Amino acid sequence: MAYNDDSVLARLSSLNESHDSIATAAQWIMFHRRHADRTVQLWMQRLKDSSSTKRLSLMYLANEVVQQSRIRHKDDFVIAFSPVIAEATSLAYKGSPAEIQAKLRRVMDVWKDRSIFEAPIQKAIEARLDELDKARGAPKSGFGGSPFGSTSVPSELAPLVTSHQKVTKLSAPLTNTIASAIEEYDKQLDPDNAVPSAPVYAARLNGLLKTLANAENAVAECVKARENLVSGLEKLLNATRDALASDKRAAENLCERKTNIEDKKQEVELAIMRALGPAESNGALIEGESGSPGSEPDRPEMEALTPPPAQEEQAMAPLETSGETATVSSTKVSLDMNQESALPYQSLSVSANGSNKRRRIEDSGDFPDLTGDGIDPEVAQLLKDDGEF
């Protein structure tokens, strides 16, 4: 395809993030390197009119072109991109999602590490990106700085962070570099292509050797960086495993000690209970008292269940018995019975018409002879005088 503005814009419009698309477009553009200035102008125009995703593809294309130019020592595109690359980078970075911004940052780091552009241009690129981050309120990451922003990194992880950053920087352009070298190799050894004259063919083969050597060096650097990262990860893993084993041993030791103390505590408590004795369980002893239980208290005195005394007015109440009215005397006669052979008497309380009457009843039904032996005659006479016999 002949070189003109339409062909360049067509190439740029059909560009995507795939490696084949970027490598093919870069080869075509570099083939027309004598139009480098015009190509960069059209590239910048297309960048301004594209979305953030499309701008990332255009930045990848610029990265491929300038790196290949450095490798082949043909600085046409490096010189052409230098005046506009800071503005282009800022334009692609501004308003893009965080994922796209991170990818652009990695491309900028590669440019800095490999000195693609001169130091003033590289500083201008960094300053523009830092201003955008500051305006957006994001922490300043800086090139080669910590990817965690202002977050402090533990000292044992700092070497790993550095190794990971180096791997990221080296691996970002590695795919394109390898693909370009392989493509150039296939192109030069394709039997369908016409073999040029010997001097031209020798020059091309010499350039292919340099391309393959550069790709090989890039891969070797990436391999070395990954080996360092793996070694650091293994050291951290081994140290963490050792610390874990030590913590487990400490936990087992503490658990054993805790069990011993619990058993000892139980023994002491049992000894205390045995020393206090069973009385302690019913309450503490009063000071000055012995541990033996006290005597049982005396039973309370109970009032005898005796009939209430006869009232004075009831004593004189008339008592009707067999049609006769009798007056019951309230005077009680006490007999001093000196002889154990005295006949027993029973006293019953009889209630008749609301009055109380006390009668003497002989067990045998008859009164004994009061004048017999063993009875005082005077007492017998008194009994006869008072009774109704």
Image (spheres, rainbow, N blue to C red):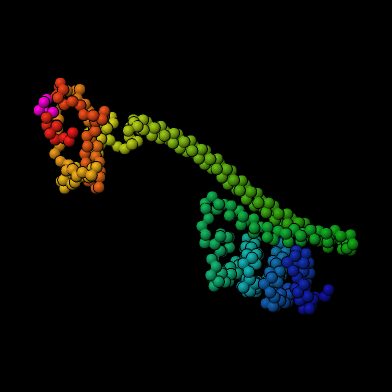
Q: Position of residue 54 (x, y in %)?
A: 70, 72
Answer yes or no: is residue 108 visible: no
Residue 66 found in image quarter:
bottom right
Prevailing SS of the magenta stretch = helix
Query: In terms of depth relative to the viewer, which is nearer, 313 or 283?
Result: 313
The answer to whether residue 18 is magenta is: no
77 sits left or right of 328 in the view:
right
**Vertical side of 178 occupied by 260: above or below:** above
Q: Which residues are magenta?
A: 376-380
- Residue at 62 percent across and 64 percent down: it is 102
Q: Where is residue 203 drawn, in percent x and y? A: 80, 61
Horizontal arrangement in the rendering, residue 345 relative to residue 137 (left or right): left
128 or 271, nearer to the observer: 271
Quarter of the rendering occupied by the C terminus: top left
Image quarter of residue 93: bottom right
Left or right, residue 51 beside residue 160: right
- Looking at the picture, how far across and down is residue 24, in whole percent? 78, 67
Q: Quadrant of the N terminus?
A: bottom right
Residue under the image location 65 percent in, 49 percent down: 227
Residues 228 and 271: in front is: 271
User: In this rendering, is residue 215 above or below 354?
Assistant: below
Coordinates of residue 221 in the picture (x, y in percent): 67, 53
Q: Is residue 328 above or below residue 373?
A: below
